[in-house]
Image (cartoon, helix red, strand yellow):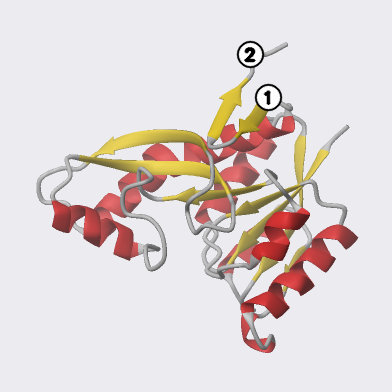
Amino acid sequence: MSTNIAVLVSGGGTNLQALIDAQARGELGGGRITAVISSKAGAYALERAAKAGIPGFVLPRKEYASNRAMTLALVEKLKELEIDLVVLAGCMVIFTGELVKAYPNAIMNVHPALIPAFCGPGYYGLHVHEEALRYGVKVSGATVHFVTEECDGGPIIAQKSVPVLEGDTPEILQKRIMTQAEWKLLPQAVSLFCQGRLSVEGRHVTIKEEA
């Protein structure tokens, strides 16, 4: 049985594109992206979805009184669309606990650093890379994790390190982490979920061998 995937976006959708490309190559482990939901009208990610023939939906954050109100509307939409896995790919809304309760261990996020470094409230977009460079780390990277009520605090599924090089700017480091880590890790993690190969116990995610 196919796993229905919804990808939540706010902007350009480069991680969404990585998932669309992986799906086209048959690499999502039986999963299928059946919806792209944007928190902003006019997000370029919606164009990417349309080009791939994937239905796009907009739940504009500004039309809801609070993050909780938007979260409740989102959960209703996901249930209506019969979604099995929710993937946050550059979605700039902090959803409230109702989403996690509706989809326990079935929401994934990709974060552009090696958690627990440079994560949590305020660490998003270029801020992450600015802080990494300011700190002087020699490696950074990306993390795919399950989403819990703690911001960036859920069980880690996969991580990949990327070197920090002399002369890096936040933009250069961001691009290297995207191309070398994020765009590879996220489709792999989604594929493992869709194959039923991830099990979660407390903070630990175990990847089962292929049957």
Residue 183 spot, x, y in % from top left: 48, 42
Q: Residue furthest left?
A: 166
Q: Residue furthest front?
A: 202
Residue 132 spot, x, y in % from top left: 23, 53
Q: For mark 1, what is the residue?
A: 197
The reply to whether dot 1 and dot 2 touch (C-beta < 8 Å) is yes
Q: Is residue 69 above or below residue 181?
A: below
Q: Kindly tell me whether residue 27 is visible in this rendering.
A: no
Instruction: Answer with the quarter of the image where residue 197 lies.
Output: top right
- In the picture, measured across the screen, residue 143 lies left or right of residue 108, that is left
- In the picture, measured across the screen, residue 92 lies left or right of residue 64, that is left
- Viewport quadrant of the N terminus: top right
Q: Which mark is residue 177?
A: none
Q: For mark 2, what is the residue?
A: 209
Report the amino acid beneath label 1: Arg
Mark 2 crowdedness (10 Å alpha carbons): few <14, some 14-19, many ≥20:
few
Residue shown at the point (59%, 51%) measured from the top left: 147
- Viewport quadrant of the C terminus: top right
Q: Kindly tell me whether residue 209 is visible in this rendering.
A: yes
Residue 20 spot, x, y in % from top left: 64, 46
Residue shown at the point (58%, 37%) measured from the top left: 187
Q: Is residue 174 above or below residue 206?
A: below
Q: Residue furthest top?
A: 211
Residue 54 spot, x, y in % from top left: 76, 55
Kind of element beneath mark 1: loop
Instruction: Answer with the quarter of the image where residue 23 lies.
Output: top right
Q: Earlier in the sequence, mark 1 or mark 2?
A: 1
